[in-house]
């Protein structure tokens, strides 16, 4: 689709969106909402079909290799973005010369370059090619300065290459295509031995001299003396040229106009600005020192295909079980919820396709979590609808009131989860970035589908004057339970859990950190029939290792055989891969060599990842704290924040206690838990505040009543989330096992704390600070109310 057409369609849909919320007519809202929903779905389907071509798979699902290189230009030389561009260009040329297509090379930070090499037909990346790629990427760029050979001429080049002539002590090199060529020539005959080596270049820069671009180059040591000697000898002789050669290609061949003392030369010519900058950065040669691989990952095609199959299986099971639950529990309204969920998924993948965002393994987790978030919003609306019908309202009035009253809780809950997703998107790295992208899109489309799509469906299928009634199943009625009275028991339980969590983390220490935070090498492979934990351990321990390897076997439900993950010290990953392959422990496909996934992370990068992840976690929590403090009265903010810290401490402790290692994807899980915990707490707090406004009586009784009123919703949303994430844990395979386990723990702890921790803390804080909760809520309402139109003196 032409960009202009896509822009106009997007602008029209935005206009409809604004019009929908700006009109008071239900009939007009129904029509506009229908056009808007169908328009968005149609646009996304057009952008999505066929998904195999339109959805861009991340490296972990497409298969391939990823390298993060650190540039070290040498002592006293500072890199700038232009130097990084030059390094990217050099690496691109090397990989293109190898016949590698669809390579993605991007700058990262101030001195790093990320290289993604995907698997393609005819370009399968096996162990041999992986080593070849590593060699090409980590070799230093060769920069030298050669004088032209006395016999150099276009005719002589043709004769030598045709075998009709021979020139001693010479080499024929081509000009680089994108650089200025002397006389339109393609090749030159140069002296074989360089006259100046690249290490003698001190610096190079450009300047615009009255509209003409010129390059200055400063030499040091022997290069400075050699430049003066050659320029003095050959000045004014246009037949003698100094060819600047980078990686066996001539990037410029100027002649000497004058003697050059002091080692600083000026290169003039008919350069464009881009050519001048390229030539200057080429001579600085940011790849003069061998780049260091700080992070390396290899995703074999078979493991990538297995990951896709497992992700699809987990998603389908999650969707089917959620659909069955909604249909059984909410019946006709459940059909409408599923219609909204279908729109949600179409929009999510459509937007990923439109913006060509990578869909990664962690993104699968984001999709499945999005299903839970979308159903959560529907449960909130439907439980409100049940209450409005029980209060005697007509079906039309009950639907309208349910959407209006649920809006605040849905919006607040989604915003806090969106905050965590945005922080991850901003600060996180690696796998977590894919999770954050998917979750961010998922939250936004969930709001759209829950608040607009399902409302439009109700307006068509259950109009205000409809005689149809909506029947819901009810497992939990309103229970009169003294939740706050149980706080003595809950305090002891929470204290025991927190002490246990802190103790476990203290004992484990750095041993609880995964490869991404501790550094080292890790291999992953599908096991052959002879592979067991004992045989794999034996094969690895035969290597010369300074520390004990960590061997973990994982068997996914519905998958074929076991998958092993082996962690060894830094620099030993390649040897470990060869060891398990040579021992016949790796599953072979159709006689091919067994494929072993490999991750290499230097201790420096691991330290940076750990620091950045901690910053992301802290920033996420601070932003959530700030939002809750601004959104709620102080007493409620204190309860929400303490409950959130409580949930995270216990969740991290249980994850570590279970023997799992803390890694990048778990940072995403912990921030998702923070969002979920606040989500649950906000819904209960909203109901407590609403009940305090409308009912008289003892505050403790009112709080118990409000918690009991939302108990059904709390349990239902936890159940639907557990269904989807449980499917991910059971069917999603080893790669997503840790993430889904952490979310399951977080949901259970968050449900417990929203009932038995957050509200009791609010009540305790109000008593301790002698705060009248009802007065605090009413005063807050008055402060936020719009000014009256009575005028003033």
Image: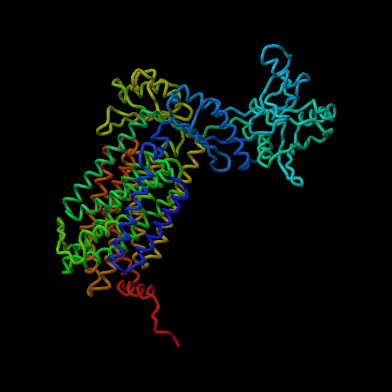
Provide residue 234's location: percent of width, then percent of height.
83, 27
Residue 387, quarter of the rendered image = bottom left
Quadrant housing the N terminus: top left
Provide residue 447's location: percent of width, then percent of height.
33, 56
**Up/down of 99 relative to 113, above or below:** above
**Up/down of 63 relative to 674, above or below:** above
Provide residue 725's location: percent of width, then percent of height.
28, 44
Quadrant housing the C terminus: bottom left
Q: Nearer the viewer, residue 290 or 449?
A: 449
Residue 165, quarter of the rendered image = top right
Provide residue 308's location: percent of width, then percent of height.
33, 35
Residue 92, quarter of the rendered image = top right
Q: Is residue 447 visible?
A: no
**Up/down of 639 relative to 541, above or below:** below
Q: Is residue 715 left or right of residue 575?
A: left
Q: Is residue 778 visible?
A: yes
């Amino acid at each position: 689709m032409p960009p202009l057409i896509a822009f106009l369609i997007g602008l029209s849909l935005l206009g409809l969106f604004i019009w929908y919320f700006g009109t008071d007519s239900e009939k007009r809202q129904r029509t506009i909402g229908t056009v808007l929903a169908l328009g968005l779905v149609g646009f996304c389907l057009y952008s999505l079909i066929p998904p195999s071509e339109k959805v861009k798979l991340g490296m972990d699902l497409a298969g391939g290799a990823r390298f993060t290189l650190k540039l070290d230009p040498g002592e006293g030389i500072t890199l700038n973005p232009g130097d990084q561009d030059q390094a990217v260009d050099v690496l691109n040329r090397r990989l293109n010369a190898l016949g590698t297509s669809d390579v993605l090379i991007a700058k990262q930070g101030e001195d790093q370059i990320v290289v993604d090499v995907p698997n393609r037909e005819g370009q399968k990346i096996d162990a041999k090619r992986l080593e070849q790629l590593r060699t090409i990427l980590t070799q230093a760029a060769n920069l030298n300065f050669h004088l032209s050979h006395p016999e150099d001429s276009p005719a002589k080049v043709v004769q030598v290459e045709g075998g009709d002539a021979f020139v001693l002590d010479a080499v024929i090199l081509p000009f680089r295509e994108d650089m200025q060529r002397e006389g339109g020539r393609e090749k030159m005959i140069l002296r074989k031995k360089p006259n100046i080596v690249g290490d003698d270049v001190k610096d190079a820069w450009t300047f615009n001299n009255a509209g003409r671009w010129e390059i200055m180059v400063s030499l040091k040591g022997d290069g400075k003396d050699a430049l003066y000697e050659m320029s003095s000898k050959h000045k004014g002789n246009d037949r003698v040229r100094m060819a600047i050669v980078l990686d066996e290609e001539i990037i410029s061949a100027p002649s000497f106009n004058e003697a050059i003392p002091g080692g600083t030369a000026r290169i003039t010519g008919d350069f464009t600005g881009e050519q001048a900058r390229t030539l200057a950065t080429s001579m600085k040669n940011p790849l003069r020192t061998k780049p260091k691989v700080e992070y390396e990952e290899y995703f074999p095609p078979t493991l990538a295909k297995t990951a896709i199959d497992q992700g699809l299986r987990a998603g389908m099971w999650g969707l089917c079980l959620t659909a069955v639950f909604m249909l059984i529990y909410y019946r006709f309204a459940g059909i409408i919820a599923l219609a909204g969920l279908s729109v949600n998924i179409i929009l999510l993948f459509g937007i990923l396709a439109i913006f060509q965002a990578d869909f990664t393994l962690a993104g699968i987790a984001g999709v499945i979590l999005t299903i839970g978030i979308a159903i959560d919003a529907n449960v909130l609306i439907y439980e409100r609808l049940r209450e409005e019908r029980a209060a005697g309202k007509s079906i039309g009035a009950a639907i309208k009131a349910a959407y209006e009253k649920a809006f605040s809780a849905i919006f607040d809950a989604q915003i806090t989860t969106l905050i965590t997703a945005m922080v991850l998107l901003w600060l996180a790295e690696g796998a977590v970035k894919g999770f954050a992208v998917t979750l961010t899109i998922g939250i936004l489309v969930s709001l759209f589908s829950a608040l607009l799509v399902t409302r439009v469906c109700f307006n068509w299928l259950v109009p205000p004057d409809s005689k149809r009634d909506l029947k819901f199943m009810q497992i939990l009625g309103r229970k009169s339970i003294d939740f706050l009275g149980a706080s003595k028991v809950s305090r002891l339980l929470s204290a025991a859990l927190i002490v246990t969590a802190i103790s476990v983390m203290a004992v484990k220490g750095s041993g609880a950190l995964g490869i991404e935070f501790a550094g080292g090498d890790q291999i992953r492979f599908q096991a052959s029939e002879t592979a067991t934990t004992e045989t794999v351990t034996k094969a690895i321990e035969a290597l010369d290792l300074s520390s004990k390897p960590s061997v973990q076997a994982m068997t996914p439900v519905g998958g074929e055989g076991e998958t092993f993950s082996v962690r060894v010290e830094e620099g030993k990953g390649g040897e470990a891969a060869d060891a398990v392959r040579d021992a016949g422990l790796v599953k072979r496909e159709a006689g091919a060599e067994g494929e072993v996934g490999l991750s290499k992370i230097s201790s420096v990068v691991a330290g940076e990842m750990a620091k950045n992840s901690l910053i992301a976690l802290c920033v996420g929590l601070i932003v959530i704290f700030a939002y809750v403090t601004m959104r709620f009265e102080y007493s409620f903010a204190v309860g929400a924040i303490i409950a959130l810290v409580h949930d995270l401490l216990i969740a991290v402790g249980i994850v570590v206690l279970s023997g799992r290692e803390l890694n990048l994807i778990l940072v995403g899980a912990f921030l998702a838990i923070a969002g979920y915990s606040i989500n649950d707490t906000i819904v209960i707090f909203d109901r407590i505040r609403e009940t305090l406004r409308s009912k008289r009586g003892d505050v403790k009784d009112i709080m118990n009543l409000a918690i009991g009123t939302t108990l059904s919703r709390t349990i239902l949303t936890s159940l639907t989330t557990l269904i989807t994430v449980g499917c991910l844990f059971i069917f999603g395979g080893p790669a997503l096992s840790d993430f889904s386990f952490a979310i399951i723990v977080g949901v259970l702890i968050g449900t417990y704390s929203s009932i038995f921790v957050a509200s009791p803390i609010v009540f305790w804080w109000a008593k301790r600070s002698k705060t009248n909760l009802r007065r605090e809520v009413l005063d807050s309402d008055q402060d936020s109310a719009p000014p009256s139109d009575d005028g003033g003196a």
